[in-house]
Amino acid sequence: MNSSPPTRIVILGGGWGGVATARRLERLLRGRTDVEVTLISRDNYFLVTPLLFEACSGTLELRHCSISVRESLETTSFIEATVQQVDFDQRVVEATAAGGTTHQVAYDQLVLTLGSVTKQRIPGSEHALTFKTMADALLLRNHFIECFERASAETDPGRRQALLTFIVVGGGLVGVELFGELTAFRDNIARYYPGISRAEVRFRLFEYGPRILPEVDAGLASYAVRVLERRSGAAIRAGTPVLEIRERALRTADETIESETIILCAGILPSPTAAGLEIDRDRRGHLSVDATMRSRSHPNVWALGDCASIPGPDGRPYPYLAQHALREARTLAHNLCAALAGGKPKPFLYGSLGTMASLGHATGLARILGLRLTGFPAWWFRRTYYLFQMPHWSRRMRIVADWTIALLFRPDISKVDLADERALLARNTPAGNARTSPPKEKDSSAAGGRSPN
Ligand SMILES: Cc1cc2nc3c(=O)[nH]c(=O)nc-3n(C[C@H](O)[C@H](O)[C@H](O)COP(=O)(O)OP(=O)(O)OC[C@H]3O[C@@H](n4cnc5c(N)ncnc54)[C@H](O)[C@@H]3O)c2cc1C
């Protein structure tokens, strides 16, 4: 009888990279009892980020752009907890669960895939909303509807204009897709606000670089500008650095715009937890790994996804995208198993299949395997692709039902104000029994909801 303890693989982070690594390990290690895999993540779901835009506008039920981690895994143990630190000498991870319980989890092999947070380099970034998590999408949706509600009753022209001005900072894929979705959202809800003309609502997108969408060729980027600027009140300013964000305003070199809604989509930085670890990192805090995704300083530590800098064949790091994180996860799982068997890990090699973006109003753009698509076909292809990325038919059917309902019926503009709900709960709870204290501000979304990452 073999009495040696099993090898412990611990994965930190249950997003695209973490869940895909665990699933591939389950396949590779099927039937083996000498290896245990544990996944620790702050949330018990992972977010299908390309669907977050539609979840924000309400085309998709918010929960339907997420997948339960437990549902995705078969033999992997799951712990819902926030990783605090890793003791690389003792090989122990410390994580805290929601109720305050501290977990000390020992490992033999560690996989770090803790994702990223929105870059907040512009002075005053704390006044801006972010768009990275499910909470961000909910806060933005509530805030957007609230701006229309308040504007419809506002008599001061300046305040009304600020309420009806929506600014996106950052012209990469996320910023442009969000901009497109918000203009479409405005068009869909406009009928409920007869006192507000479409022309009164302004959308601005500011991009530091010379053009938007550096991820695609210049032709597709110009197409996006043409489509978006045809929408009433929409303007895109490339080559325009934002110098400062204030509580209700944004400043560039030649103008200051009053706005209640400034959304920051100007790049990402690795998760602060990952960037704070005592392990080899690059200048920006990305975990420094070789081409096999093994840490340069700790051979039993591996990293992938948004928190890692994985060199490609030309020495430049791979882009921080879900399509890459998924493929990295598969190679990493193979490499880990090879390392356990005393074999040689192989480098990660991947040529992108292409790029797709939705611009709202059933329009999109895509370059897939060299093929260029625009308009409805690109939008349809993107939607169908992400639908089939969902792991179960039950989830796919729910998404199709949401899309069909959105096509046939008017949009829902109910606003679930969580801050107000909490205040109400606290008021209705006898003193001493209050489980939550009322928030200081009426609505945290209006004050600039922040990504909890
Ligand atoms: C709105 C949006 C749209 C996008 N669209 C696309 C797209 O169309 N195509 C594409 O390829 N890419 C897209 N991306 C990028 C893609 O989402 C990321 O590249 C991908 O999520 C990276 O995977 P990851 O596993 O590294 O990180 P994530 O998927 O972010 O997972 C990180 C996980 O770690 C957990 N975590 C973080 N800190 C801790 C902690 N301290 N303790 C415990 N757990 C922790 C998080 O809860 C999360 O579950 C988009 C991103 C955004 C924000």
Image (spheres, rainbow, N blue to C red):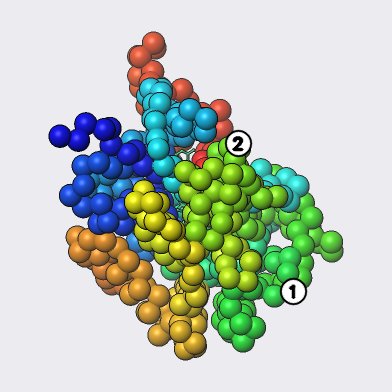
Out of 290 and 70, give the one closest to the viewer.
290
Report if the beta carbon of the residue with label 1 is closer than 8 angstroms to ligand 1: no
Residue sitting farthest toward the bottom: 371
Q: Amino acid at mark 2?
A: Glu
Q: Which residue is mark 2?
A: 278
Label 2: few (<14), some or many (≥20) within 10 Å? few
Is residue 315 visible from the viewing direction of this image?
A: yes
Out of 308 and 419, give the one closest to the viewer.
308
Out of 415 and 97, give the one closest to the viewer.
97
Q: CA distance from mark 1 to mark 2?
A: 37 Å
- Between discs 1 and 2, the one toward the N terminus: 1
Q: Which residue is mark 1?
A: 210
Out of 89 and 448, give the one closest to the viewer.
89
**Picture residue at 56% right of the left edge, 32% below the top:** 441
Please identify, in this view, whether the residue under mark 1 or under mark 2 is nearer the observer.
2
Whether residue 41 sits left or right of residue 255 in the image: it is left
Q: Pinpoint residue 57: horizontal percent, then vertical percent.
A: 43, 61
Whether residue 282 sits left or right of residue 353 in the image: it is right
